Image: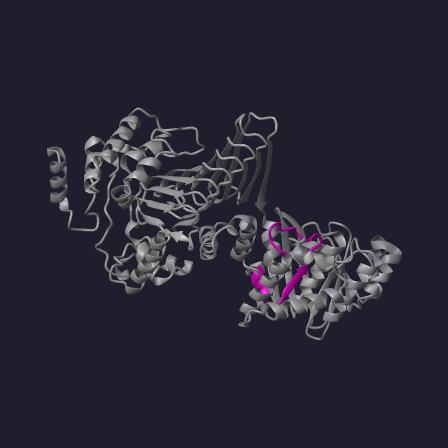
Amino acid sequence: MLSIKNLEVKISNKKILDQLNLEVAKGEVHVIMGTNGVGKSTLLKAISGSYETQVKGSIKLNNEELVDLSPDERACRGVFMSFQNPIEIPGVNSVYFLKTALNEQRAFANKEPIDSIHFMQTLQEKMGFLDMDKSILQRFINVGFSGGEKKKSEILQMMILEPNLILLDEIDSGLDIDALQSVAKGINQLRDENRSFILVTHYNRLLEYVHSDFVHILDGGKIVKSGDSSLAKELEQKGYKDVLKT
Amino acid sequence: MSKDIEKIISTEYKMGFETDIESDTAPLGLNEEIIRFISAKKDEPSWMLQWRLKAYEKWTQMKEPDWANLNYPKIDYQNISYYSAPKQNIESLQEVDPKILQTYERLGIPLEEQKLLAGVAVDAVFDSVSVKTTFEKELKELGIIFCSISHAIQNYPNLVKKYLASVVPIGDNFFACLNAAVFTDGTFAYIPKGVKCPMELSTYFRINALNTGQFERTLIIAQEGASVSYNEGCSAPMRDEHQLHAAVVELVALKDAQIKYSTIQNWYAGDENAKGGIYNFVTKRGKCLGDNSKISWTQVETGSAITWKYPSCLLIGDNSHGEFYSVAITSLAQQADTGSKMIHIGKNTSSTIISKGISALKGSNAYRGLVKVRPSALNARNFTQCDSLLIGNKCAAHTYPYIDVQNKNAKVEHEATTSKISDEQLFYAQSRGISEEMAISLIVNGFCKEVLNRLPMEFAVEARALLDLTLEGSVG
């Protein structure tokens, strides 16, 4: 599904990632771990097409090169990234924002715009599933949301847009246990054989709820060690220094 | 008719009054003869001519104001033609620049209206004519006068004499004074006592006054208990380049009367190097003369190279209320210095100013407002909110609020914000599948919602489409 080859990424002319390779097959869940500032978020930003990143190398989604596509073109092809710090957009209503996004993606797939009643029903249902406060529907997107509301709102958007490649950047940070469980529920509900995930996280605790296939350690701009979910547990016990030594 | 005028007319005629597109036009320059020429062309009564001459005399002694935050080459007032009659020689839309038609189409303007806007003679168009006559009859039955100001000068001289320049005096300012001397046409509306005008009045239905040239003069009077909503739309990019447009609008609301005046201004804006475009110097003022009267201005300013415009309210009657809702966009190299004046004179008068300025590319946008509370205005209230939105790194937003309170019981509030559409916001929206242009449109529409919601339905739809068009390609 996703094939990254010889990826070099600079931010403000500073090289963050270098010669990075990663293959993600359909239905797999990959976890990226690493110390602060090692470039985990940069990798996700590069895949989703952030303006901050200057990219060399190849990022292919289902054999289509993404590097020259704009972020919205990538989104329409099924890429979704949840933000570590979701951006506030004053003046833009949450429901309207999400409906516009869905309809833009539907238009790209030559589908009719969704009718409002059906959309609202789906939205309410998913919000119930995630145990979300309905009042955020009346607010501007991410404006005045609590940390937990922001993260849940990202998961809600993911569930509505039903992307194929899902990139979650520290979706578990700053969440209480109940919220973490809701977020994990949302992720697990979307898991199937055609959908792949890349999770960036610092902690093993999300991985107690979401089963992962591969764990990679990022260091010095590349993936230096890969393993299965036991690697994350090992990291939590020993720390990066010791694990990378062996 | 003096020999001079005859001479000018005949000279002009030789130059080809009846030939090509630019035919029925006065020679360049401004002097007493030109004013006599305009007045004669319009077959005006002598009192009107005298009024114009008085204005001209005053104007020659006035100086062009330079306090606005605007930068433009000095205007040569002797290098402008002050009279241009409707262009009647375009007979079908095929003769109109296809680019203009494309814009109309994207704005969703109906075909018949497109013809009107493009200056196609519509006398033969059955639908429009019948529409117009139907409304005319209905309005007449209610005693509402709705016609061109030229028509009013001929047919309702007493009303015109009583109210013309009663709100904006002849010598009020340089541009208003110029307008008084040379105005060519405009709208006149009179709503008699107790009548609520049953429909939105708009320039679209006043076919005879389209293509009136750059100096229009509008006068609207709402008698005791009357109410009216007037829409002035120029949703057509003008073909003309670098023209001076100096209009005057006067509103008079008597006791318990209400006037709502909505404008969509989309004159030609020039290009990104400030080449071409309309210089738009407009004086708009309403007088809440009677107790409990209300005047509301709503404007969406998307066009013009230069905009200089401060729709204002004189709140004279007790409990009278003034409103100003504005969206002004400057993109390319456009400059706007616009805002409102609320002058509180009567007791318990209140006013609201909501101004939304948007700057993109090299656009420069200034809000300039005055809230003045005279000693007589016991318990006056004003609320001003003034927001600026920046798109990109080369644009500018300025705010010049003046507050002058001379009564201790007044309550005046001013709120202002400046925000910028960030790359992060655009990326966030785009990462959800929303295109950059759509994302800007969402943000801008959200930013202006309060003002756009004030517009009548069809107008609001048109305004939204215009905002999108104006900001197209505004991010590099």
- Please check the rendered image and state whether residue A82 is part of the magenta-colored stretch, yes or no: yes
Residue at 12% in and 40% down: B11
The quarter of the image holding the C terminus of chain A is bottom right
Q: How is the image coloured?
A: one colour
Q: Is residue B58 left or right of residue B70?
A: left
Q: Which residues are magenta?
A: A72-93
Rendered view: B156 above or below B20: above
Q: Position of residue A124 (x, y in %)?
A: 70, 66
Q: Position of residue B155 (x, y in %)?
A: 26, 44
The quarter of the image holding the N terminus of chain A is bottom right
Q: Foreground residue, A243 or B309?
A: B309
Rendered view: B462 above or below A215: above
Q: Position of residue A196 (x, y in %)?
A: 70, 69
The outermost residue toward the right is A237
- Please check the rendered image and state whether residue A130 is part of the magenta-colored stretch, yes or no: no
Residue A18 visible somewhere in the drawing: no
Rendered view: A72 above or below B48: below
Residue at 39% in and 34% down: B167
Residue B285 visible somewhere in the drawing: yes
Residue at 71% in and 75% down: A193
Q: Is residue B201 left or right of residue B28?
A: right
Q: Position of residue B5 (x, y in %)?
A: 14, 36
